[in-house]
Image: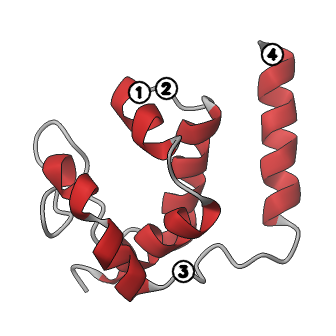
Amino acid sequence: MMIKKLITASAIALFMGSGVAWADGDAAAGKAKADVCSGCHGAAGMGDENNPALAGLDAAYQVEQLAAYKSGDREHAMMQMFASQLSDEDMADLAAYYSTLGQ
């Protein structure tokens, strides 16, 4: 298990250092993809007592968290299920959208 986490962390570090801009998502495309997220995080990404707010969070941070759910490094059954279905582009788009809300 420790080796899996080390490999995943190394892969994420390589990806982050590869010059790929984590926040280069398309906010308009993210808005179109956000319907499934709004069920728990709210239509405006404001969250509630059981689900964190996404509105205004840094896009790179959001992509990092989605990638951690997808890889299994961050555990939450529902989020792992949803994140496992997201491409890197989907993650960047959603993060771009939510980072623009609440500003």
Residue type for callout 2: Glu
Q: Earlier in the sequence, mark 1 or mark 3?
A: 3
Front of the two marks 4 and 1 = 1
* Inter-mark Cα distance, 1 to 3: 24 Å
Q: Is residue 96 left or right of residue 5?
A: left
In which quadrant will I find the N terminus?
Answer: top right
Reading the image, the residue beneath label 2 is: 75
What residue is drawn where x is 78% and y is 75%? 20
What residue is drawn where x is 78% and y is 63%? 16
* Inter-mark Cα distance, 1 to 2: 4 Å
* Inter-mark Cα distance, 4 to 1: 19 Å
Reading the image, the residue beneath label 4 is: 2
Numbered mark located on residue 76 in the image: 1
Q: Earlier in the sequence, mark 3 or mark 2?
A: 3
Reading the image, the residue beneath label 3 is: 25
The local secondary structure at tag 1 comes to loop
